C-alpha cells in the first residue's frame, strides 16, 4: 500500500510542478488553487508512505517521479527541448527509481 501511496504522491508532484506554469506566478485563481491542492496532497501522501518505507527511498522515488514526469510534460505541453542527452538522463532517472524500488524495501 505504501508504494501505491508513493506513486500517487509522485504523480501529484508532477501535477503541481506543471501547474506552477499555469498559475502565472500565482496570479490565476483556479490554477493556483489546484496547484496548492496537489502540493498538499502530494506531501501528505509522501508522509504516509514514509511511515513504512525508508525515507531515503520514499523521497528519492517521489522526487524522481516528479522530475521525470515534469520534464516529459514540459516536452509535450510546453515544447521544451528534446535532445538525445536529455532523454538518456531521464532514462537514467527511471532506472534509479526502479533501482530504489527493488533495493529499498521496508524498514
Image (cartoon, helix red, strand yellow):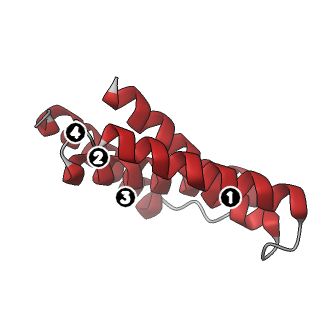
Judging by the rendered image, the residue that carries numbered circle 4 is 53
Q: Earlier in the sequence, mark 1 or mark 3?
A: 1
Q: Nearer the viewer, mark 3 or mark 4?
A: 4
Mark 2 surroundings: few (<14), some (14-19) or many (≥20) residues within 10 A: many
Judging by the rendered image, the residue that carries numbered circle 3 is 89
Residue 36: give its label. Answer: 1
Look at the picture and state if 105 lies above or below 36: above
Mark 4 and mark 2 residues within 8 Å of each other at the beta carbon: yes
Residue 58: give its label. Answer: 2
Mark 4 surroundings: few (<14), some (14-19) or many (≥20) residues within 10 A: many
Look at the picture and state if 79 lies above or below 54: below
Local SS, label 1: helix
Residue 23 location (% of width, % of height) = 80, 66
Q: Earlier in the sequence, mark 2 or mark 1?
A: 1
Q: Earlier in the sequence, mark 3 or mark 4?
A: 4
Q: Earlier in the sequence, mark 2 or mark 3?
A: 2
* CA distance for labels 4 and 2: 6 Å
Residue 77 appears in the picture as rendered: yes
* CA distance for labels 1 and 4: 25 Å
* CA distance for labels 2 and 3: 21 Å
Left or right of residue 43, residue 25 in this image: right
Residue 4 location (% of width, % of height) = 40, 27
Amino acid at each position: 500500500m505504501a508504494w501505491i501511496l508513493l506513486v500517487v504522491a509522485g504523480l501529484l508532484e508532477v501535477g503541481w510542478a506543471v501547474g506552477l506554469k499555469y498559475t502565472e506566478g500565482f496570479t490565476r485563481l483556479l490554477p493556483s488553487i489546484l496547484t496548492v491542492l496537489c502540493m498538499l496532497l502530494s506531501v501528505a501522501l509522501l508522509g504516509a508512505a514514509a511511515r513504512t518505507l525508508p525515507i531515503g527511498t520514499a523521497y528519492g522515488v517521489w522526487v524522481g517521479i516528479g522530475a521525470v514526469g515534469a520534464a516529459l510534460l514540459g516536452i509535450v505541453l510546453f515544447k521544451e527541448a528534446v535532445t538525445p542527452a536529455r532523454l538518456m538522463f531521464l532514462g537514467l532517472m527511471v532506472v534509479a527509481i526502479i533501482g530504489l524500488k527493488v533495493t529499498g524495501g521496508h524498514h
